[in-house]
Amino acid sequence: MVASEAVPFAKTGGLADVIGALPRALAGLGHEVDVVMPRYRGIEAGSPERVITVALGNLMSDARCYVAAGERVRTIFIDHPGYFDRDHLYGANGHDYVDNPERFAFLCQAALNWAAESSTPYDVVHAHDWQAGLVPVLHERMAESSPGLDRLATVFTIHNLAYQGVFDASWLPYLGLGWGLMRVDAMEYWGRVSYLKAGVVFSQLITTVSPRYAQEIQTPELGFGFDGILRERGSDLIGILNGIDYDQWDPERDSNIPRPYHANDLDGKEAAKRELLERYRLPASAEALARPVVGLISRMVDQKGFDLLADIADELPRLGATVVLLGSGERRYEDLWLALATRHPDRVAVHIGFDERLAHLIEAGADLFLMPSRFEPCGLNQMYSLRYGTVPLVRATGGLADTVQNFDAASGSGTGFTFDEYSPQALLGTLRWALGVFIDRRTWRRMQQAGMRQDHSWAASARRYVEVYERAMASRVGV
Ligand code: ADP
C-alpha cells in the first residue's frame, strides 16, 4: 500500500485510520502487507535498511528507506528530509506546500522502486488518494523494463473525492512525466493536471469507502467534476465500507475512559459522561448529568455541515442539552463556536485542537453524536459512536446512510437519526426529535444496544478488499 498517512505514525484524517487498520486485518486473513509512507518529522519508528535512487525527470535523489516490521505488516518509511522533515504533512498556515506535486511524486516513485528492487515480488500495489495517485501511471511506465513489476496489479482507493491533487500542468515535464499525459483521457483536468485522476484512469480497479458514496460520486452533484470519468469506469468502481479498529475503539478495553462498559452494562458510560463534563469544565450536578450531551468531533469545514450548524447555533443552547465540540478548521467556525461557548458557558463547551484521548472520552461520554455532513465518503465517528452506545444523528449521505438506520417510532427499531435535506431546518427538526426520544429511556437504551451490537470490524471489509485484489490480479495475467 502506498499512502501519505497511517496511524500510529501520522494522521490528519480518516485515511490514516484506514491505513493503520486494513493491513492488519489483511494480515489476519493470512496476507502479507507492506505500507510505504513518508518519514515525516517526528517519526522515530523503523531502522534504516536500504537506500534507493529515485529519478523524476532531471531530478535525481536518494531515499533512505526505514523499515518497521510487525507481524505480517511492515511499514517502509521513505526518508527524504528535504521533502518530509517539515512541521506539517501537507502545508502550513492554510496554504499547501508549493512543492506537494514533487513531494508526492517522489513518494510514488520511491514506492515503485522499492517494489522493483525487492527479492520477493508483490502481487498488488494499492494506492490511496491523490498523494498516491501517480502510482498506477508510473507503474505502467516501469512495468515493461522492470521484470518484477510486470505482473503487479494496481488498485486505487478514493477516500475523499473533494481532494483532487490539481496542479499546474508544467509539473508534467518538470517531473519527467511528459506532455503525453496532458489529455482528457489521462491526467488533464480543466487545463491543469490531477493526481487523483491519474489514479482513477490508470489503475485496474478503483474502490471507494462506502457503497452509497460509490454511487453518489457518479452523479454531477457529488462527482466534483469527476462523475463523467467515474461513470465511464463504473464497472470497475467498487464501494467497500471502512471498518473501525476495535483495538483502538472499544469501550470494553479503552484506556482513555474511566471505566469499561458494554451493551449489557452501561454504567461505565455514565462515569465517562461525568468525566467529560468535568474535563470541559461544565456543570456535573445530578441535573446536568440527566441532560443529554450532544458530541461533535470534526474538522470544522462546510463538508462536515458547519454551515448548517452555524445557522442553528443560537438555538443549540436552548434545546435542553449540553453540547461539546472538539475540532479545528476554518477560522470563522472556530470563532463562532468559541463565542457561543463564551455566551453559554454551562451549555456549550469547545476545545479547538486535535486530541485523540479527548475524542475517545467524547465518544464514550456523549449521548448523541452529531454528523450533519454535506457529503461523507464513509465517516468513522458515527461507527465509533455506534460502538460506544452514543446514538448518531447524521445526514443520510455516503457512508452515513450505509451505517445508520433511522429510528422508526412505530417499531422502535433503528440505530440513530437521519435526515435527507441539507438544510438547517431539517437538522434542527431532527435534533429536536432525537432529544424528545432521549426522554424515553427504554427506547433509547434499545437503540444504544442495537448500535453496540453491530459488527463494523475490519475483518469483513478486508475480505472484500481481497476479492478486489484477486479480481485485479486475474485481469493482469489475462485469465
Ligand atoms: P475525515 O477523515 O473526513 O476528517 P472521518 O470521520 O472519516 O472524517 O475521520 C475523522 C477521524 O479523525 C476520526 O478518527 C476522528 O475521531 C478524528 N478527528 C477529527 N477531528 C479530531 C480532533 N479535533 N481531535 C481528535 N480526533 C479528531
Image (cartoon, rainbow, N blue to C red):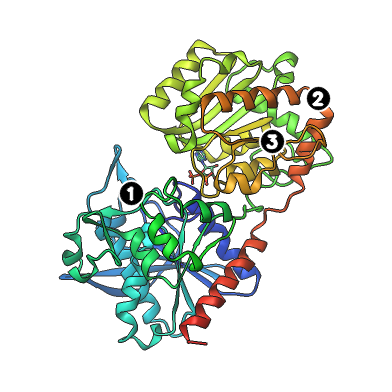
In the rendered view, would you say 471 is above or below 146? above
Say the numbered circle drawn on residue 440.
2
For image coordinates 26% across by 70% down, the residue present is: 62
Side (left or right) of 54 relative to 263 = left
Amino acid, disc 2:
Asp
> Between disc 1 and disc 2, whose residue precedes?
1
For image coordinates 64% across by 45% down, the residue present is: 383
Side (left or right) of 94 relative to 310 = left
Regarding residue 128, the answer to whether it shows in the image is: no
Residue receiving disc 3: 390
Task: Sort mark 1 into few (<14), some (14-19) or many (20+) by Cα contacts within 10 Å.
Answer: some
> Where does the image place residue 450, in percent across and percent down from the top left?
78, 43
Distance, label 3 to label 1, CA atoms, is 33 Å
Residue receiving disc 1: 90
Task: Sort mark 3 into few (<14), some (14-19) or many (20+) by Cα contacts within 10 Å.
Answer: many
Task: Sort mark 2 into few (<14), some (14-19) or many (20+) by Cα contacts within 10 Å.
Answer: few
Distance, label 3 to label 2, CA atoms, is 15 Å
Amino acid, disc 1:
Tyr
> Between disc 3 and disc 2, whose residue precedes?
3
Q: Nearer the viewer, mark 1 or mark 2?
A: 2
